[in-house]
Amino acid sequence: MTKVTYLDHSGFAVQLPDVLLVFDYFRDPSHALHKILEANPQLPVVFFVSHKHEDHFNTGIYEMAQNHRRVYVMSNDVPAQAIPSTLEVAGMSAGDRIEGLPGGVSVKAYPSTDSGVSFLVETPEGEKIFHAGDLNEWHWKDESKPAEVKHAEVEFTKALNRISSENESVNIAMFPVDPRLGSDFGSGALAFLKAVKTAHFFPMHFWGKKDEAEVFLSKIPADITEVDFIYTPGASMEIK
């Protein structure tokens, strides 16, 4: 069984039988991560940091889970001087792959269309868990120039093609659905879902604009994916 807990913004804790994966911890107002760690003292923890932006990277992760084995998998754009030398850290750029992480998981880094990378984690059982980081079709179509929109579309399509060419399907995808982008804010998410068959889709990076995100999510055809919209910090969903 896999348990997905929404921490806040783009932060998730994904609990597997033999390891806890923590993606892009930014803040955790419900203290959900502390509760998970306290309830599972035997679990090693892998912290993933997709990039250096402060809404995806909080140095507080260095002080967490001190009674657990901890591994930090971080985009190479995170400044080295911000990383304590005493920690077990692996830096990644797009194309890099790491095997033999706690719980037997592996991870491959894929491109982002902003800073850093996106992550594809694979379990020993073959389950695939994708966290997009800041990968998205970042354009404000309502106010951007046509050339800017075209550039964003081309860059996103290039990154998406690389991911989909190696991953026909994923079990879980966490992907930005950001209403700040205007009327076309869901175009990146929909393109991802059409390119990569996704069993469970978890929206993120919606900046608290739950109602606006829900309108878009309600339009995703049911035969494309199961949308698991957990928007309250600390809320969880179990996937069997």
Image: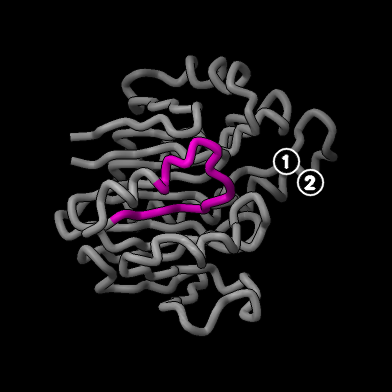
Label 1 Cα crowd, 10 Å radius (few <14 / some 14-19 / many 20+): many
- Colour approach in the figure: one colour
Q: Which mark is residue 148?
A: 2
Above or below, comparing residue 79 to residue 175 in the picture: below
Residue segment shown in magenta: 20-34
In the drawing, does residue 229 fall left or right of residue 116?
Answer: left
Q: Quadrant of the C terminus?
A: top left
In the drawing, does residue 37 fall left or right of residue 148?
Answer: left
- Of circles 2 and 1, the one toward us is 1
Label 2 Cα crowd, 10 Å radius (few <14 / some 14-19 / many 20+): some
Disc 2 is placed on an element classified as helix
Nearer-N-terminus badge (2/1):
1
The residue shown at (55%, 38%) is 29
Q: Position of residue 234 (x, y in %)?
A: 44, 34
**Residue tagged by mark 1?**
139
Q: Nearer the viewer, residue 71 or 179?
A: 71
Q: Quadrant of the N terminus?
A: top left
Q: Which mark is residue 94?
A: none
The residue shown at (65%, 80%) is 81
Q: Position of residue 231 (x, y in %)?
A: 50, 27
Q: Nearer the viewer, residue 164 or 83?
A: 83
The residue shown at (33%, 41%) is 172
Q: Nearer the viewer, residue 35 or 165?
A: 35
Where residue 121 sits, quadrant-wise, is bottom left
Q: Nearer the viewer, residue 181 or 64?
A: 64
The amino acid sitting under disc 2 is Glu
The reply to whether dot 2 and dot 1 touch (C-beta < 8 Å) is yes
Q: Can residue 168 be seen at all in this image of the molecule? A: no
Q: Indicate yes or no whether the magenta region holds residue 32.
A: yes
The residue shown at (29%, 66%) is 106
Disc 1 is placed on an element classified as loop
Above or below, comparing residue 135 to residue 183 in the picture: below
